[in-house]
Image (cartoon, helix red, strand yellow):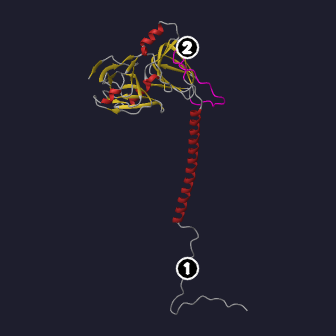
Amino acid sequence: MTDPPIEAPSAPAGRSPAAPAAPLASAPSAQVTVYRVLVGALVAAAFVEAALFTRLLADQRALVAELRARAEAPLSASAASSASASGSTRVAAPAASGARVDARPDVTISDLSGRLAEIERDFPDAPDSSVTFFNSPRASVHMHVMGREQICPLHLHRASFEATAIVSSVAHVTNVFGKDGALVTRTADYAPGAVISSPPECGHEWVNPSKQHKLGNLVFAAPAFDLNQYVRKDDPRMLKGAEPLFYEPTADLDALANGAEPSRLRKLDLMDGRMSALVVKTTARIEVAPGRPIVAYVLRGQGWLDGAEPHAIKATTLAVIDHGSIGVRAEQPTALLLFDAFAEPAPAAKSAVTPAAQGSSSAR
């Protein structure tokens, strides 16, 4: 026996049968399509971001490992500071067994006159500009470019020693320091090649008197530059500041010319014993241990630094010597200022430095 067929219910009398319902669309609507595209794009972006983050994390870990390895590498103390006939600044630390080869350049050269010309051209109306060449917790080196007739008001540094080499133009400098229980004010003008050193809490004001040219100052600080503490001219904190010092290489170059040595090195009473003057008649050598860079600035003359490759140098050349045995060849008598942030404070040859007293002084 078979089941009877199921029939569709008939329409009530007087009415037409209802039209059959339209079937559902088989393709997704436009809204669903857009939604799926957006979800796909977000998922793809998440995968890309995760890949980039993983790469960045790996790079950061590699950098931390490198810095840790450099910090833990054995370093020798600086050799004796007295100059030898060879003009070496320091004996390099012996390489540790299995130590990795440093991939960084042994010497990085900057032409400060060229950098200053670029700033003059690109930022002619800027009142101040700054370019940093070396920075670490122990020390920093930067060039401060002052605009025409610009003033850097009287200020002091609470902890850092500061030495400034004049790169271009003439600096009008006022120092305020303590002596015999009173504040002494000293004002002088300094030309390119001169170096002025201010100990902690010694006040100093810098003026560019020129109406035509910017003033370029190469600033060495140890510990690293700790910003300016601006003060009034009678601030008692400056009573604790020691007398500023001044160096320029003429006397050392004259002494070298009258002697038989190819070069002469003298530790200066600047920056608490962290600075030396290297004058070269013919040749000298600078030995720099890995992880203990030396910054060299050419005050006078011209010649070559010979590292992995030769570098031409002249007055206003700055060289950050990262490591290695670097030769110096002078084409004419050459004076370099050497800044060793890792040097331990030591008695210096005070005869190599004269007080910064070329201008007027007053006490109150």
Q: Amino acid at mark 2?
A: Ser
Magenta stretch, main secondary structure, is loop
Packing grade of label 2 (10 A; few <14, some 14-19, many >=20) is: some
Taking the image as shown, residue 97 lies to the left or right of residue 161, namely: right
Q: Which residue is mark 2?
A: 86
Taking the image as shown, residue 271 lies to the left or right of residue 98, namely: left
Residue 99 in the image: x percent, y percent?
A: 64, 30
Residue 362 in the image: x percent, y percent?
A: 27, 20
Q: Are marks 2 and 1 in contact (CB under 8 Å)?
A: no
Q: Earlier in the sequence, mark 2 or mark 1?
A: 1
Query: Can residue 203 be seen by looking at this rendering?
Result: no
Foreground: 110 or 1? 110
Residue 20 in the image: x percent, y percent?
A: 56, 81
Q: Which label sits in the foreground, 2 or 1? A: 2
The residue most toward the left is: 364
Callout 2 secondary element: loop
Residue 355 in the image: x percent, y percent?
A: 37, 17
Q: Which residue is mark 1?
A: 21
Query: Range of the magenta residues?
Result: 78-104
C-alpha separation, residue under disc 2 versus residue under disc 1: 104 Å
Q: Please state, as top left, top right, bottom left or bottom right, where the C terminus lies in the image.
A: top left
Foreground: 97 or 326? 97
Does residue 84 show up magenta in the picture? yes
Question: Residue drawn at (64%, 28%), measured in percent from left and top?
Answer: 96
Residue 332 vs 152, above or below: the answer is above
Query: Can residue 270 be seen by looking at this rendering?
Result: yes
Callout 1 secondary element: loop
Q: Please state, as top left, top right, bottom left or bottom right, where the N terminus lies in the image.
A: bottom right
Q: Amino acid at mark 1?
A: Ala
Picture disc at residue 328: none
